[in-house]
Structure formats: structure tokens, C-alpha cells
Image (tube, helix red, strand yellow):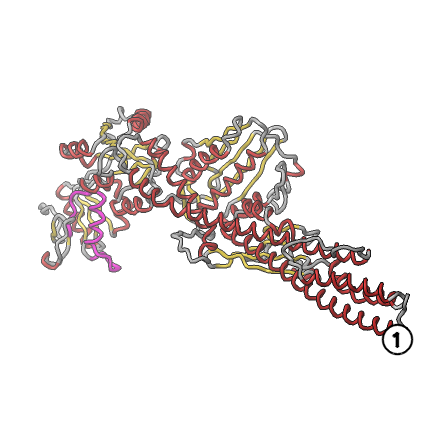
Amino acid sequence: MKYVSFKGQLIVFASSFLVAAVGMTVFGLQERSRASELVGKSFEISAKQLADAIGFSVKTSDLAAIEMIASRSFISESADFYRILDLNSLPIFQKNVEGAGLAVSLRELCGTRASGVLSITYANAAVGQIEYCYNSHSSIATGWFLAMPFFVLLISGVLTVLNLGILKLLLKQIWQFLSTLEKLDPLNPVLLRPNGGQVHPAVNQVYEQVGHLISRINHLAEEREKSKIVVALGEVASQVAHDVRSPLSALEMMLGRIAQLPEQDRLIIRGAVNRIKDIAQNLLDQNRQANAKKGVTLPVVISDSKEPQSTVLLSSLIEPLVTEKRMQFRSKIGVQIEATLDAGSYGLFGSVQPTEFKRVVSNLVNNAVEVLPDNGMVSISMRRSSNGTDIIVRDNGRGIPSDTLAKLGNRGETHGKAGGSGLGLYHARTSVESWGGRLMIESKVGAGTAVTISLPTAQSPSWFVSILELSAGSSVVIVDDDASIHQIWQGRLDSFGVAKNQISIVHLSTPDQLRNWVGDQTDQLRRTLYLVDFELLGFRESGLDLINELNLGHQSVLVTSRFEEQHIRERCQKLNVKLIPKGLAGFVPIGLVKPRIKLDAILVDDDSLVKMTWEMAARLNGKTMVHLFDALGFFSRASEFDLRSPVYIDSSLGNDVKGEWVAKEISDLGFESVFLATGHEPSQFRPMPWIKEIVGKDPPWHAVG
């Protein structure tokens, strides 16, 4: 066997080392860069998908939805650590954090690992951010790539004492290995072994580590393909939501024309239509950003999580919510969900954010149902308290131990709910406190739990009838197409004692019946209260149309289930009509007002000399009169006066208050004879149909003696 000289062996050693060392170092660094880039890109895509999915939930502070979506994301499975922050940089969800306080920075948490920060936006406005860190490459594979030159050096040293033929064979295997790596598609894992021959054990370990790295890259590529499917599903959801709006609009329009359905059935259909509209809107909101990137314009009405507080009738928020919860938990046959609303809950208003309030109560009901066994009861009740209004969500479940009870309501504290984070109850407490209220929890082991939302007193709005006032000898006309409503009103009025107070009740169901009744009245017309429904079955005229046509605004109350609709409230305000929610007709308080005083004159004038002149003339002529210095004084006592009493008002009441405009408001209250008593010539005033006559400053009676 022929051996090469030492010089030849040295040349072979040097050349093989240089070629292998340079080749493997360059290739190793190149593959490390490619792998790191692919891993980082995959995490960035996954973070963006998560941000798009939770944008609406972060904006509306829906912590339960955030937790559900985030826990199923790719980042949750693969990132070393990540957290979701709100606009105040406070974590609202975090995962894979070991003892990290709120003040720990991302750099401290991630150390030398790769990290990323992505803004969460909704409606093109930032609502929070996602922070995460991850291993950008396989440290083992990278170590092998960088150690390869030294490995080759060791092999080359051994080759200096071996036969050139053996050296050539081994070099051939190394070049085959390098050739295989160069042709490798990182997204297509293959068997990393050369064709034929024996492989050195050290080289085989390199094969295995490279295979592991490429398998990881392939996994990330698969996740990316899955994310494309999620985006496609989002687009389909948006299209469904968009397409369903047109038939919904047609259905809503036709709803007002259904003449065969009674009131209760119309309420159910309207509630179903509104619920579908809400679902469609939610689908549009959740997928709007993804579609906008593809140039799709969506007709979305964006809701604002920072909705202002408004004064709302709390029972109107609770009743539909209870119906929704019954549907949600209908599979739990043994669990009952009830709303206990009675006369004590009538007229209880709260200054809250309506959407947020419903979310809080919804979460409390969810918590109660989810800890119940197969059978149980969850009830929602309301009561007037010394400080305002209490809303109580009560269950008859297992109860909560006292040591746990003291901690509930704090961030991260939960009880009895598998996988619970405590964020829902924490969110409920902070929301209630932001409205000036308190959230209290009472529980007894074995007896159940009661969560009380205590809200401060809120003033009833001007459109609401706090008490239905009747006067002896008056009439009550009920106009409604629903016989059950007539029965409710008859029962309430009989219990009040209409017979002994000589109050007559008239039941009407059609527009023509009301027109005929009003046309037949003379003296009793102004002593009548009209309780009118908004929708009259089978007729195009609404109750408000009739009130306006017959000029009954100041004597009418609209009794309707559609009291929350803004356009109805605005028209009622214009017609001076108040409202009673139809569902509360059985609870509205009824009171008897004192008989109104019939006077010969009511004088509104800020001149003391005029006052003395009129009072003297009234005394000498045996007339009754009342003097008031300004409009405020009149309106504070207007309910005392019979509407047939003539009112005399000066044109100039001081402080630039014009009597003719005050006279318009007095006429709107139902006073039949309003006179403008002024020293100015009548020709100086334009026509004012609400003023019966323009007269002078003299009393309407001639002095005697």
C-alpha cells in the first residue's frame, strides 16, 4: 500500500481544514439567521392574529373573552412568556410568568431571549399592547454549526496519520453531507443521511440536530397555514354578518305591519330581531380590521367601551338579560334563572354605562350558574335602599368559606370555578365603584351566595311617570289593542278605589273610537287622563299620531314597550307626553290629587302696584284670585289650579322674560283661557293662537262704590 509523504499529508490536512471550516461556518451562520428569521416572523404573525382577535374585547374590557381567546392562541402554546396590557400599561392577561410583579419590565423578563411588542388597536385607535419573548433558534443546533470547524480540525488531525485513500473516502462523505445541506428545503423535512456507506457517529449527531431544527421550522410553517384558515373564517363571518343586515331591515320594517299578532308576540319577534342585529354587529366588529386590510368597507357602527354614564331604568336592562341567560343555560334543565321584579322595583334608575352594567350582571349570573350542581336557582331582584338602589344576584349553591370570601373581588382571586382567573369579579367590582357604588358578597356554606350591587340614587328623567295622579270626578281613557292590558289597568284602578272617588274608566281599542269619544265630550274633556299604546293593531296611526291630532299631549301618557327608542322619546317631549314602560303597568303607583281650585283670575305680574289694584277690585267685587310675581311661581303651583281658571300675564316679567312665551307654556299645560295683560297696543304683537285676547292692565271687574 502506498503512503503519501508527511509534506503531502500536511497539505491535505491544511486544505481540508480550511475548506470545511469556512464552508461549515458560513453555512451554519446562514441557516441560523434563516431559522431565527422564520421563528420571529411566525411569532409576529401569531401576535398580530391574537391582537386582531381581542381588539374588541380589550376595548370593551370583556376579560372572560380575552382569557378564552388568548389561552387558545399559538403564542400561549409556544412563547416563553407573554402578557396583554391595557392603555394604562396594566396587565389584564399574562401567561408563563413565574413570580413576575406588575412593575417588571419586558427586558427583565426576557433577558437574552428575543422579544416583541405589538399594539392592539380597535377602530384605528390603540386600546392596549401584547408583549412576548421566545427562543429565536435551537441553541443545540446552532452550537453544532459553530463547533463544526473544530470538529473538522479534529478529524483532519487523525487523517494525517491515515492512508490517503481513507482520507479521500471520508472527504467524499463530508462533501456529500455539505451537498445535501445546500439542496435542503427548510420547509420540507427529509432524511438527512448521505446515500450509501457508513456515517461517522459525530456526523450523525449533526444530522439529527439539523433535522430537529428543520422540524421546528416546519411546525411554524404549518401554524402559519392554520392562521390563514382562521383569517378566511373571519372573512366568511364578516360576509355573513354583512349579508344578514338587509333581510333583517326588511323583517324589521314588516314587523310594524303584522296585523294578526298580539302585543306579546310582537315583543318576542322584535326582541329576536334585535338580538340577531346584535350578533351580526359583533361579527362585523370583530373582523372589521382584517377585512379593511383587503379593501372591504363594512357598514359598522362602532360602539365605544368608554360609553358615558347615563340615567337608565335598571329593570329594562335586567329583564331581557334574564331571558338571554335562560336561553344560554337551557341545557341545564335543573337550573332556574328568575327575575324577581315587583312594585318595589318600579322607577329605580341608576347612573351607569348600560352596556357595561349588562356585562357585569351577566358575568355574575354566569358565575352563579357555573358553580351550581345539577339543580338550583339563580334569582335577580331589586330594592330601594337608604342610599339608592340594590341589585341582588342570589344562588342557593354550595356557598363560599369565610376565609376565601374576604379575598374575592381582588385581582386573581376565584372560587369554585375550574380554570377561573378571578378577573370577572374584579372587573365587576371596579366597574361598580366607577359608578359611585359598591359590590358586596355574602355567603354561607351550604346555603348559597348573594352578590349585591349597591348604586347611588339617580333622579328619574323627565319623561318617566313616577306616580299616576287622578282627581276625584275625572275620567281615565285606556286606548290599547291588547285585551290583557285593559284587564291590568282595570284591576289596578279598581284596587285604587275609582268608584268611591267617582272616577269613570273608558276602554277603547281603535283610533276612531278615540276620535268619537273626544268629539262627544264637553265639560269632561279637560278632566280626562289618556293612557295610550304606541302601536295599535291593524292601524297605520300610532298612539302619538292620535295624541297630536286631537291635541291631547298635556293629558296623555304613552304606555309602550318601545319606551327606550330615542325617536319616540323625542316626539313625546315635543308633544309634552310622558311615558310608562308597558311591562311596568302593573306596578306604577296611583295617587289621588287634591281637587283643583277654580279661581276668577290668576295674575302673573312683577308690579306690586298692579297687584294691590287687582286684589282690591277682587275684594270689592267678591271675586277669588291669586297673584304670582313670576313664571317660576306660577309653574310651582300650576297643579293646584283648575284648568278653567283664566290666567292674566304681563308681557314684561323682568330679567328679559317675555310673558307671551310663558303664556305658550301655560297653554300647553291645558289652561283654557290665557290673556296677555299689558300696557302696549295689541297691534305691536304678532298673532299668537295660544293667547285668547290681549287686554290692558285694569282688573277684569269694575270697582264698586
Q: Nearer the viewer, residue 34 or 628?
A: 34
Q: Is residue 336 left or right of residue 269?
A: right
Q: Is residue 216 left or right of residue 316?
A: right
Residue 85 located within the stretch drawn in magenta: no
Q: Quadrant of residue 88?
A: bottom right
Q: Nearer the viewer, residue 653 or 165?
A: 165
The residue that disc 1 covers is 7
Where is 676 relative to 106, above or below? above
Q: Residue at point 23% right, 55% down? A: 606
Magenta segment: 652-676
Q: Residue at point 53% right, 40% down? A: 363
Residue 80 appears in the rendering = no
Q: Amino acid at mark 1?
A: Lys
Q: Nearer the viewer, residue 433 or 318?
A: 318
Q: Is residue 78 left or right of residue 437?
A: right
* Mark 1 crowd level (few <14, some 14–19, many ≥20, 10 Å Cα): few
| Residue extending furthest toward the bottom | 7
Q: Residue at point 35% right, 34% down? A: 267
Residue 672 located within the stretch drawn in magenta: yes
Q: Nearer the viewer, residue 353 or 702?
A: 353
Q: Is residue 607 left or right of residue 40?
A: left
Q: Residue at point 42% right, 58% down? A: 295
Image spot of residue 520 (x, y percent): 13, 32
Image spot of residue 538 (x, y percent): 23, 33
Q: Quadrant of the N terminus?
A: bottom right
Q: How many marks?
A: 1
| Residue extending furthest toward the front | 1
Where is 325 relative to 145, above or below? above
Image spot of residue 414 (x, y percent): 62, 41
For label 1, the SS is helix
Image spot of residue 616 (x, y percent): 16, 47
